[in-house]
Amino acid sequence: MDTAVLTTEQVLTRDIPWETYMSTKLISGTCLQLLRRYDKRPESSRAQLLEDDGPAYIRVFVCILRDIFKEETIEYVLALIDDMLAANPNRVRLFHDESLANEDIYEPFLS
C-alpha cells in the first residue's frame, strides 16, 4: 500500500513498539506510562487525559518527533496529534501552555 494515501485512521491501526523505545532509552518510563494510558483508547478517555494533563501529552508527542526517526512512528504520532485536534480544535491551546514555555515544541514540525 502506498503510504502517501494512508488516512489517519489507517495509520492509527499500527502497533508501535513503545516498550522497545523505552528499553533503548529513546523514551523515558514516564513517557511510556503516558503513552500506555493514551494509545488505543476511546476518544472519551483520551479527552479526559488531555483535560487533566494535556501539556504532558504534548511534551511526549514532541519528544518522540524530536528523538525517534522511524517513519512509521513519526507518522503515527502525527496521526495522534491530527486525531486529537480534529476531535477538538480548541486543544491547540495545549501547545501554548505556559509549562511548555521553555521548550521548543515547534522545532520537530519545522525540520
Image: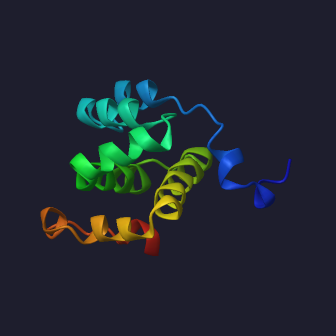
Residue 79 position (above or below residue 102):
above
How far across and down, in percent of the image, does residue 89 sit? 44, 69
Q: Does 62 sit left or right of 84 as displayed? A: left
How far across and down, in percent of the image, does residue 52 sit? 22, 47
Residue at left offset 66%, top offset 37%: 13
Camera-side residue of 32 and 22: 32
Q: Does 45 sit left or right of 57 as displayed? A: right
Q: Residue furthest front?
A: 44
Task: Locate residue 3: give its quadrant.
Answer: bottom right
How far across and down, in percent of the image, does residue 57 sit? 31, 49
Viewer can see residue 111 = no
Task: Locate residue 21: give its quadrant.
Answer: top left
Residue 61 position (above or below residue 20):
below
Q: Does 97 sit left or right of 2 as displayed? A: left
Residue at left offset 54%, top offset 56%: 83
Residue 28 position (above or below residue 19):
below
Residue 30 position (above or below residue 65):
above
Residue at left offset 18%, top offset 64%: 100
Q: Does 4 sit left or right of 18 as displayed? A: right
